[in-house]
Image (tube, rainbow, N blue to C red):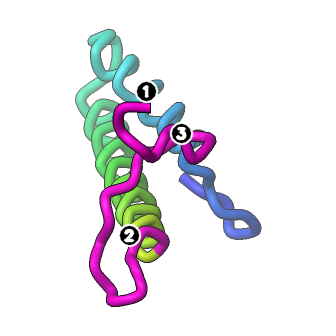
Amino acid sequence: MATKDRELKFEEAIADLEQVVEQLESGDLSLEDSLAAFEKGVGLVRYCNQKLSEVEKKVELLVKDKQGQLQLKAFGNGPADSEPGQ
């Protein structure tokens, strides 16, 4: 999945996962190869879920107000995007 020297990027993991799914869906793999591909896919799914959880925690920290309450903020490029009706 990832080399020891560098961490796999989320986008690379998703691309690898898509390849694994295509291989499994093709039906051309032997039972042993299918099992290996499935195991690789499970590892990639776990990795992606971990990365998404990390990002979610970072975003949550960024949108807390001074009292520690989460504030719903629109995702956009400017102040007009964060105020409804404008």
Asked whether 71 or 52 is in front, the reply is: 71
Q: Measuring 54% from the left and 52% from the top, which residue is drawn there?
A: 1
The residue to which callout 2 is attached is 60
Q: Measuring 34% from the left and 25% from the top, which residue is drawn there?
A: 21
Compared with residue 67, is residue 28 higher up or lower down, i.e. above or below? above
What label does residue 44 carry, if any? none
Q: Cα distance, mark 2 to mark 3?
A: 21 Å
User: Which quadrant of the figure has residue 3?
Assistant: bottom right
Asked whether 41 or 67 is in front, the reply is: 67
Q: Earlier in the sequence, mark 2 or mark 3?
A: 2
The residue to which callout 1 is attached is 18
- For discs 2 and 3, the disc positioned in front in the rendered view: 3
What label does residue 80 carry, if any? 3
Marker count (numbered) = 3
Q: Residue type at mark 2?
A: Glu
Residue 45: where, in percent of width, then height?
33, 48
Q: Secondary structure at mark 3?
A: helix
Q: Secondary structure at mark 2?
A: helix
Q: Residue type at mark 1?
A: Glu
Q: Earlier in the sequence, mark 1 or mark 3?
A: 1
The residue range painted magenta reads 62-86
Q: Measuring 33% from the left and 86% from the top, which residue is drawn there?
A: 68
Q: Measuring 30% from the left and 22% from the top, which residue is drawn there?
A: 24
Report whether 39 appears left or right of 59: left
